[in-house]
Image (cartoon, rainbow, N blue to C red):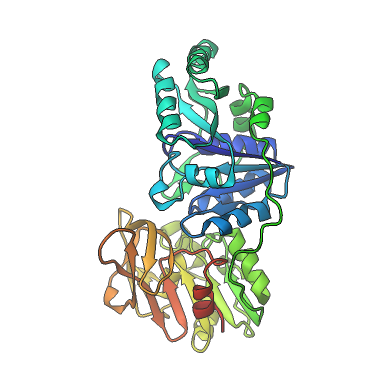
């Protein structure tokens, strides 16, 4: 099989643009992956190639679990894994592109910025190559290059300095970029994908990339997760343009353990069926003006959720938590939980966290609780002191800022999702 990791020295270096181009090029035969706890890039991957993207996160899964997950979903001719931040960033949590590509034995293409430089690019590459001797860096793509002669100047220096690195091409400077939102890529800016993809790959040697990316697939990996008994229960997942943060493997896992799983679109004012046993509200956006406009008039959805919550289980993540609360500033939510929120100008949490009840995951949000004394479970950042409340509960209704991967989290499933 063929598999490749796309990484760089930092965020905003062009990883997503190169990944987009390759996903579009291989769109009929590619399986996309995203390293780290990201929701936006995987949605974008799916839009580009039509195949759901799978998150690979070493902090939330152990080595055997992560290896199984990668091999389980690597059923197409090519697997393309987009890295997170810089190549070594996250290695303190064992979840960097370096750690994951090393574990899975996936070769890495490093995207290096060549603007305003030439010899220093090779020095930077030497630092990346020698920082960890067992790294997976096999190839280089040069970004923001002024001309063919500029590219050849850098390429010749790298090839002189390294006998085990293949320079496979370049991307010209001032290429058209996709617009951003405050939490990532704008998923509506799709009209230029084909044009951008073709422009990105114009000066990249695809055959050399394919030669580098050839690996041996591991076979017969034993299922490494604690098994959950099949439940004769109906699960309704609130998953739409507002509540869009749903890991694809979480969805597949929930389909495996519940006899029936349905999707509810709150923005279309869909009601939760009366025979539903559990409701899971995904993370996403509900606090912004644009998102709130889509749901503020969804009275049937709101009424059915309130009725369900009186006697049955509800689990809400991040935006799901916000909607379970009383309000976000002046925006009225369902009022099920006795907690209100405010939206701040700066993010309040970002990174990996542990909860007091022993769960681990990640959080990234701009809101905070106005009355945190109503919380019962704190989220503490790794290697830091006391955390602040991040989970809230009333009867069988539970909301949390913590995003988790379900398959390896039997404790969460048994305590929050099993009726």
Q: Which residue sits furthest left?
A: 385
Q: Residue 180's spot in the image, x, y percent?
A: 46, 43
In the foreground, 258 or 129: 129
In the foreground, 79 or 203: 79
309 shown above or below 207: below
Image quadrant where residue 332 sits:
bottom left
Say how many tags the image has. Answer: 0
Residue 232 visible from this viewpoint: yes
The N terminus - image quarter: top right
- Taking the spot 41% from the left edge, 79% from the top edge, the residue there is 335
Q: Residue 257's spot in the image, x, y percent?
A: 65, 74
Q: Which residue sits furthest bottom?
A: 311
* In the image: residue 157, left or right of residue 169: left
67 shown above or below 334: above
211 shown above or below 146: below
* In the image: residue 113, left or right of residue 222: left
Image quadrant where residue 170 sits:
top right
Q: Residue 116's spot in the image, x, y percent?
A: 39, 18
- Taking the spot 33% from the left edge, 76% from the top edge, the residue there is 375
In the foreground, 99 or 416: 99
The C terminus - image quarter: bottom right
- Taking the spot 42% from the left edge, 80% from the top edge, the residue there is 336
Q: Residue 227's spot in the image, x, y percent?
A: 62, 73
In the foreground, 1 or 135: 135
Residue 300 visible from this viewpoint: no
């Amino acid at each position: 099989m063929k598999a490749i990791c796309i990484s760089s020295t930092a965020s905003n270096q062009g990883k997503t643009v190169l990944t987009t181009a390759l996903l579009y090029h291989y769109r009929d035969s590619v399986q996309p992956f995203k390293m780290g706890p990201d929701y936006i890039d995987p949605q974008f991957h799916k839009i580009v190639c039509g195949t759901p993207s799978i998150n690979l996160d070493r902090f939330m899964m152990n080595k055997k679990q992560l290896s199984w997950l990668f091999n389980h979903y690597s059923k197409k001719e090519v697997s393309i894994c987009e890295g997170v931040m810089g190549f070594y960033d996250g290695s303190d949590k064992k979840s960097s592109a370096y750690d994951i590509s090393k574990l899975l034995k996936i070769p890495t293409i490093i995207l290096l910025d060549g603007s305003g430089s030439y010899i220093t690019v090779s020095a930077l590459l030497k630092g990346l190559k020698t920082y960890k001797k067992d790294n997976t860096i096999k190839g280089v793509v040069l970004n923001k290059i002024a001309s063919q002669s500029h590219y050849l100047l850098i390429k010749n220096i790298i090839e002189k300095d390294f006998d085990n690195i293949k320079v496979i091409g370049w991307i010209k400077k001032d290429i058209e970029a996709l617009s951003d939102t405050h939490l990532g890529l704008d998923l509506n800016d799709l009209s230029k994908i084909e044009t951008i993809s073709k422009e990105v790959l114009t000066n990249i040697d695809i055959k050399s990339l394919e030669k580098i990316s050839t690996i041996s697939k591991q076979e017969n990996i034993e299922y490494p997760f604690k098994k959950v008994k099949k439940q004769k229960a109906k699960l309704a997942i609130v998953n739409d343009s507002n509540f869009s943060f749903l890991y694809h493997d979480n969805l597949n896992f929930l389909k495996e353990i519940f006899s029936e799983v349905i999707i509810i679109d709150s923005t279309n004012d869909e009601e939760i069926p009366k025979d539903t046993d559990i409701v899971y509200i995904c993370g996403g956006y509900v606090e912004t003006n644009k998102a709130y406009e889509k749901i503020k008039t969804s009275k049937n959805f709101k009424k059915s959720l309130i009725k369900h919550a009186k006697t049955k289980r509800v689990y809400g993540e991040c935006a799901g938590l916000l909607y379970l609360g009383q309000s976000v500033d002046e925006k009225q939510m369902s009022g099920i939980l006795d907690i209100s929120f405010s939206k701040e100008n700066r993010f309040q949490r970002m990174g990996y966290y542990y909860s007091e009840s022993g769960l681990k995951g990640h959080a990234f949000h701009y809101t905070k609780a106005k009355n945190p004394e109503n919380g019962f479970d704190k989220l503490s950042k790794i290697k830091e002191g006391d955390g602040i409340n991040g989970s809230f509960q009333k009867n069988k209704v539970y909301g949390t800022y913590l995003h988790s991967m379900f398959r390896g989290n039997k404790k969460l499933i048994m305590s929050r999702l099993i009726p």
